């Protein structure tokens, strides 16, 4: 059995894929979002559709940046917690 670093090296662990569980609530909300997006898009002119597409692209990029920053923060926090648990502390 490989250790966690080897699994990461060989691409068997990909932290940004598959780490979200789809719950009934998230599936329902994603459905609502898709329905509302489709309804809105059906009422738009071609120029407005282009604006909406640019908005969607920017929002997706922002979401990606936010998720990456949250991952890095949480990873670092986890390591700091691990270090505090594993390393002996000097008595105050």
Image: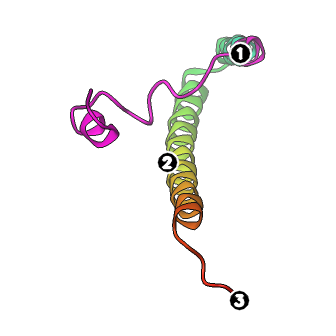
Residue 23, numbered label: 1
* Residue at image location 54% in from the left, 58% down from the top: 82
Say what secondary structure mark 1 lies in: loop
Question: Given this view, does label 1 or label 3 mark the residue nearer the observer?
Answer: 3
Q: Are marks 1 and 3 in contact (CB under 8 Å)?
A: no
Disc with the residue nearer the chain's start (2 vs 1): 1
Say what secondary structure mark 2 lies in: helix
Whole-percent x and y of residue 34? 66, 14
Quadrant showing the C terminus = bottom right
The foreground one among 55 and 67 is 67
Q: Is residue 41 above or below residue 81?
A: above
Question: Given this view, does label 2 or label 3 mark the residue nearer the observer?
Answer: 3
Whole-percent x and y of residue 39? 72, 12
Q: Disc 2 and disc 1: Cα gap in Å? A: 22 Å
Disc with the residue nearer the chain's start (1 vs 3): 1
Q: Disc 1 and disc 3: Cα gap in Å? A: 46 Å
Q: Residues within 10 Å of mark 2 (few under 14, many from 20)?
A: some
Toward the left, the furthest residue is 10
Q: Residues within 10 Å of mark 1 (few under 14, many from 20)?
A: few
Q: Is residue 7 above or below residue 65?
A: above
The residue that disc 2 covers is: 68
Question: Given this view, does label 2 or label 1 mark the residue nearer the observer?
Answer: 1
Q: Disc 2 and disc 3: Cα gap in Å? A: 37 Å
Whole-percent x and y of residue 89? 60, 77
Residue 40, numbered label: none
Residue 92, numbered label: 3
């Amino acid at each position: 059995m490989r250790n966690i670093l080897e699994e990461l090296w060989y691409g068997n662990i990909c932290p940004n894929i598959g780490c979200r569980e789809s719950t009934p609530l998230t599936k329902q909300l994603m459905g609502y979002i898709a329905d509302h997006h489709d309804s809105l898009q059906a009422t738009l002119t071609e120029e407005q559709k282009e604006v909406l597409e640019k908005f969607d692209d920017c929002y997706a990029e922002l979401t990606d940046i936010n998720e990456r920053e949250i991952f890095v923060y949480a990873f670092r926090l986890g390591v700091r917690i691990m270090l505090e648990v594993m390393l002996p502390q000097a008595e105050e």
